[in-house]
Amino acid sequence: MELKISDLSKTYPNGVQALKNVDLTIPKGMFGLLGPNGAGKSTLMRTIATLQEADQGTVQLDGIDVLKQKDEVRKKLGYLPQEFGVYPKISAETMLDHFAELKGITIKNERKEIVKALLEQTNLYHVRKKNLSGYSGGMKQRFGIAQALLGNPNLIIVDEPTAGLDPAERNRFHNLLSEIGENIIVILSTHIVDDVSDLCKNMAIINQGEVLLNGQPFELIKDVEGKIWKKVIEKDELKTYQENFNIISSRLYLGKIIVHAYNDVNPDSFKLVNPTLEDVYFSSIKNTKK
């Protein structure tokens, strides 16, 4: 089972080219699509989810032409967009039952069992009678996953699912996604590096509509070994360092600033550090801005 994207491009009427000749092969399991806001992630996800048209290119899911056979794709697809609406005064159980009927599960007893199983899987069964307006952000996201799982999809797309969640809810959501991703394709679209490093065996980094890197996280990290350098500087030195060195990231630490630079050799009394996926991400994004 795989999703194959070839030469996919999309330009909006305002002239913004959201996708530029995207080529990706996405296997079974958790796949991370990592990029900043406005990188083209949501455009790509909506295109795969049959919600918008591409200008050119092809998308194939196990022999199904995603761009042309939309009804067939929707039978195999679960989609959790970045923002999704719920009826606030309806319980989770009633709402999920309604979604199940819309999905074509017409036998009442069968629907009841499926709804129960999904609410248990997403750890919402104990609050199944509670109105959705009373759900926390994490509970709403887990309800979103429950509705995305209706119909036993082969492909699930989740767009920025952990944005705004507290650490405990984020961990619950990670555990749920990890469980789901064992047997199907799950595309996790996010700007949060830790989500990808924690969950995904395969990934791609996208920016300005282009795929910059594609592969397994540990291999991408290995590629920048010996090239990431760290230094602690004063706050008022940051601008000078950014002008004179290839600084890829900076963060405050105890009133000072820690900068990371990407370079083949020591730039200037920096210290070599073991790279992380965050270094891979920032170095690839920085290079596209030049």
Image (spheres, helix red, strand yellow):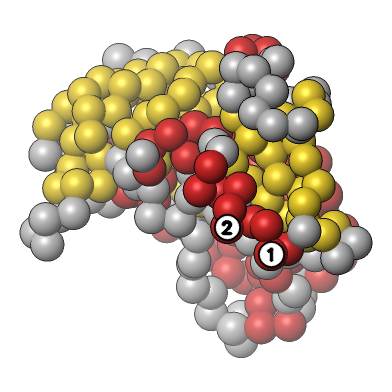
* Quadrant of residue 53 within the rendered picture: top left
Residue 75 place in picture, x, y as percent: 39, 37
Q: Is residue 148 visible?
A: no
Image point 77% across, 52% down: which residue?
233
Residue 77 place in picture, x, y as percent: 43, 38
Q: Are marks 2 and 1 in contact (CB under 8 Å)?
A: yes
Farthest bottom residue?
89
Amino acid on which disc 2 is placed: Lys
17 or 289: nearer the viewer: 289
Residue 91 place in picture, x, y as percent: 67, 76
Residue 239 numbered mark, or none: 2
Q: Is residue 242 visible?
A: yes
Residue 49 numbered mark, or none: none
Image point 28% across, 51% down: which residue?
51
Image point 48% across, 14% down: which residue?
1
171 or 114: nearer the viewer: 171
- Quadrant containing the C terminus is top left
Image point 64% across, 18% down: which residue?
265
Q: Secondary structure at mark 1?
A: helix
Label 2, label 1: how far apart the Cα atoms are: 7 Å
Question: Going by the image, does 208 lie left or right of 67?
Answer: right
Q: Which residue is mark 1?
A: 236
Crowding near the residue tagged with mark 1, few <14, some 14–19, many ≥20 C-alpha atoms within 10 Å: few
Amino acid on which disc 1 is placed: Asp
Residue 79 place in picture, x, y as percent: 47, 48
* Quadrant of residue 215 within the rendered picture: top right
Q: Secondary structure at mark 2?
A: helix
Question: Going by the image, does 79 lie left or right of 198?
Answer: left
